[in-house]
Image (cartoon, rainbow, N blue to C red):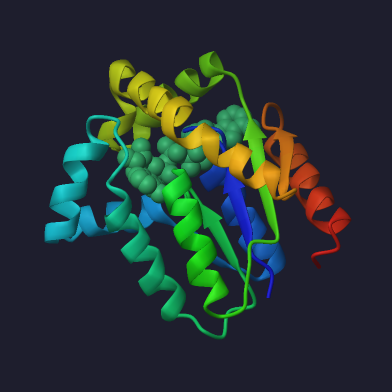
């Protein structure tokens, strides 16, 4: 099994690159953002609760997303590996993920962090908001709140994995296929495939 975290600020290309990586490597894609949006569209009580946070650009509480990931891992015991997209977003989530994987004698093998500057992030998300129908992509204030949440609560997750020598930083600006190639090079250099 090999397990990868695709890490980065909102709009850095996590969702975009995850789709390509899961296809190339046959991994199971676990996006907490996608799972939460699915809960919202099904109007579950979890979704209605999560929407209040997401519409304000805030992170959903750790207990909610950790529970979701625990269920998703348990639902796919035969997976070749998982690609975590948008999770973990806090150090508490990272610690919980390590514990969940350790229960099955598994671990995170690589954390690939996409590097993109703030002006580019805001421009990408506002652009996506024109067509995505995502309520968190329409308002620039909400987008900036998401970036602030990232800096305050999510950026320390990179330090957490750096201390474990698992973090690689990849430039996330430019051609999508060129960024994908750089991510694949990093995975292959780590002899993960
Ligand atoms: P997510 O669904 O994870 O979304 P995201 O971070 O906004 O976007 P992503 O990074 O995947 O987008 P991409 O760059 O691919 O989170 C949404 C919300 O859910 C969070 O704010 C939070 O409230 C909640 N949430 C999710 N997980 C959570 C957790 N673990 N804990 C707590 N709360 C959680 O796409 C952006 C745009 O850029 C696209 O239009 C794309 O086409 C474009 N793009 C991509 N690559 C490009 C490139 N190289 N050049 C130009 N444009 C590019």
Quarter of the rendering occupied by the C terminus: bottom right
Q: Is residue 9 left or right of residue 63?
A: right
Vertical comparison of 158 with 66: above or below: above
Q: Is residue 153 left or right of residue 104?
A: left
Q: Quadrant of residue 60?
A: top left
Query: Where's residue 151, x and y in %?
Result: 47, 26
Comparing 74 with 40, the one in front is 74
Q: Residue at x 14, y 61 (%)?
A: 44
Query: Where's residue 114, x and y in %?
Result: 64, 36
Comparing 108 with 11, the one in front is 108
Total numbered labels: 0
Q: Residue at x 20, y 53 (%)?
A: 40
Q: Is residue 142 left or right of residue 84?
A: left
The outermost residue toward the top is 119
Quarter of the rendering occupied by the N terminus: bottom right
Query: Where's residue 120, x and y in %?
Result: 55, 19
Whether residue 43 can be seen here? no
Q: Residue at x 68, y 27 (%)?
A: 173
Q: Residue at x 37, y 19 (%)?
A: 144
Whether residue 46 can be seen here? yes
Q: Quadrant of residue 25?
A: bottom right
Query: Where's residue 80, x and y in %?
Result: 64, 77
């Amino acid at each position: 099994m090999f397990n990868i975290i695709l890490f980065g600020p909102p709009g850095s290309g996590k969702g975009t690159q995850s789709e390509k990586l899961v296809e190339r490597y046959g991994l199971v894609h676990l996006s907490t953002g996608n799972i939460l949006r699915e809960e919202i569209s099904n109007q579950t009580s979890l979704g209605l609760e999560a929407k209040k946070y997401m519409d304000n650009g805030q992170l959903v509480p750790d207990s909610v997303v950790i529970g979701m990931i625990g269920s998703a891992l348990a639902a796919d015991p035969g997976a070749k590996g998982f690609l975590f997209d948008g999770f973990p977003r806090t150090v508490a989530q990272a610690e919980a993920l390590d514990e969940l994987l350790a229960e099955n004698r598994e671990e995170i093998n690589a954390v690939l962090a996409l590097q993109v500057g703030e002006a580019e992030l805001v421009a990408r998300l506002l652009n996506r908001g024109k067509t995505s129908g995502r309520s968190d992509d329409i308002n620039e204030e909400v987008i900036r709140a998401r970036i602030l949440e990232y800096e305050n609560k999510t950026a320390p997750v990179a330090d957490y994995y750096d201390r474990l020598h698992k973090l690689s930083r990849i430039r996330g600006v430019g051609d999508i296929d060129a960024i994908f190639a750089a991510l694949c090079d990093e995975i292959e250099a780590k002899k993960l495939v």
